[in-house]
């Protein structure tokens, strides 16, 4: 093992410098404010969870988990997502009433990278979950709140894609005969390898009609016209029920007046295995990855002893900031430069200005080597130097 450089960080870990920190705080605050307006209550969970509970319940691949042992020999994981920990809390402490609960969070999650490739191993998610509601109305609320929160954060150019994992599963199993073959074909979809998908379909021993159905499936993207095309492709009742859920969802998002930000993409699937129904992803601007995603996970809480419907949505804060571009929301900072004999006067003036809501730095002038650089850094500089009792000089 080679010796680490002095300033080297673990693979995929990043520092957050002051300007980016301020930007994150501004965007996070906008998202959180909108979620609270919709009645969502914020929750925090431990960064460390047991592997046997949250670790195995999470849909993140085992090789992406950060693992360690506690003093009693139990395997722990740094939380790889927030949905599984919130499901744990909801099942154990919150689902005592027959009412849906609405929870929100802002937290870092951890996923190990074998080769970084610019991908972070630690990143922040801001999200919300509606637990205890199995209706399509709850899915519509997720989409409407996601649109509203992104707008509140300042994002204008974005699109939310909607799919249904149940429809994809039913169509593929119906045509291919079993779940193993269906999973093999589904893998091309979550890799977004459509060329590989087509080649794989052509290599399968299927009738020309079934091959055409699987190829036509790739065209199920767009508005309400997709519903009719999907119903023409699927033959079993479960698959038709999934499409009718999407039809109902379209009416709901139209009532919320957010349909202009929404389109269907029935090729949408997720590597998160706990999703059971309607799925969504958000894309924006020139960002090549989804800036947010979510969906229905009705089976997840059963792993913690409760059986109830649930749906949620998470926004990747780093990708949202990339989509927003440069944000100049940093509050101006003033500086009071003082000589030692006027320190008390400087402290009093700084206190007065801070009480007025301003950000103020106190700086002993003897510790400044480059006065021009200092004065250029701050929005306003007040000089308190020389004999005590003199008026401030700007």
Image (spheres, grey):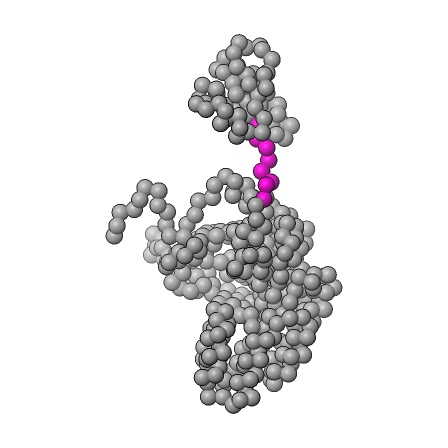
- The answer to which quarter of the image holds residue 367 is top left
Give the total of numbered labels. 0
Q: Nearer the viewer, residue 194 or 267?
A: 194
Compared with 28, 257 (above or below) is below
Residue 19 drawn at (x, y percent) = 52, 40
Report the residue at 49% width, 27% height from top.
373
Residue 270 drawn at (x, y percent) = 52, 68
Q: Any magenta on residue 75?
A: no
Viewed as shown, does residue 8 lie left or right of 175? left
Viewed as shown, does residue 186 lie left or right of 129? left
Q: Nearer the viewer, residue 138 or 131?
A: 138
Q: Which residues are magenta?
A: 327-334
Report the residue at 65% width, 57% height from top.
147
Compared with 122, 224 (above or below) is below
Q: Is residue 302 visible?
A: no
Report the predominant secondary structure element of the magenta stretch. loop
Residue 200 drawn at (x, y percent) = 46, 80
Q: Is residue 246 visible?
A: yes
**Residue sitting at the far bottom:** 207
Report the residue at 60% width, 40% height from top.
329
Residue 384 drawn at (x, y percent) = 55, 16
**Residue sitting at the far left:** 1
């Amino acid at each position: 093992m080679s010796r680490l450089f002095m300033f080297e960080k673990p693979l995929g870990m990043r520092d957050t410098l002051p300007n980016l920190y301020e930007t994150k705080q501004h965007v996070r605050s906008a998202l959180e404010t909108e979620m609270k307006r919709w009645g969502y209550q914020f929750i925090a969970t431990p960064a460390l969870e047991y592997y046997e509970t949250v670790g195995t319940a999470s849909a993140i691949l085992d090789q992406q988990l950060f693992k360690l042992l506690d003093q009693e020999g139990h395997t722990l994981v740094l939380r790889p997502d927030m949905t599984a920990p919130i499901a744990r809390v909801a099942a154990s402490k919150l689902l005592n009433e027959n009412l849906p609960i609405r929870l929100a969070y802002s937290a870092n999650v951890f996923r190990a990278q074998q080769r970084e490739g610019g991908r972070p191993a630690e990143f922040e998610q801001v999200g919300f979950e509606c637990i205890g509601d199995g209706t399509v109305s709850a899915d519509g609320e997720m989409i409407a709140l996601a649109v509203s929160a992104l707008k509140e954060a300042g994002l204008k150019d974005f699109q939310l894609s909607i799919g249904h994992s149940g429809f994809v599963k039913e169509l593929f199993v119906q045509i291919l005969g079993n779940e193993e073959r269906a999973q093999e074909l589904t893998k091309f979809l979550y890799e977004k390898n459509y060329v590989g998908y087509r080649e794989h379909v052509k290599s399968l021993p299927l009738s020309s009609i079934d091959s055409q159905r699987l190829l036509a499936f790739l065209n199920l993207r767009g508005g309400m016209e997709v519903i009719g095309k999907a119903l023409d492709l699927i033959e079993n009742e479960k698959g038709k029920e999934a499409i009718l859920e999407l039809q109902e969802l379209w009416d709901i998002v139209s009532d919320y007046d957010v349909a202009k930000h929404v389109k269907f993409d029935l090729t949408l699937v997720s590597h998160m295995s706990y999703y059971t129904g309607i799925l969504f992803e958000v894309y924006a601007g020139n960002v090549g990855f989804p800036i947010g995603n979510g969906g229905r996970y009705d089976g997840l809480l059963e792993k913690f002893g409760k059986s109830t419907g649930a749906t949620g949505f998470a926004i990747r804060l780093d990708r949202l900031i990339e989509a927003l571009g440069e944000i100049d929301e940093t509050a101006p900072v003033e500086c009071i430069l003082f000589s030692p004999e006027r320190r008390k006067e400087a402290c009093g003036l700084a206190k007065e200005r801070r009480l007025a809501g301003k950000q103020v730095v106190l700086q002993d002038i003897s510790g400044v080597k480059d006065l021009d650089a200092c004065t250029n850094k701050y929005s306003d500089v007040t000089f308190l130097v020389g004999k005590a009792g003199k008026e401030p000089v700007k």
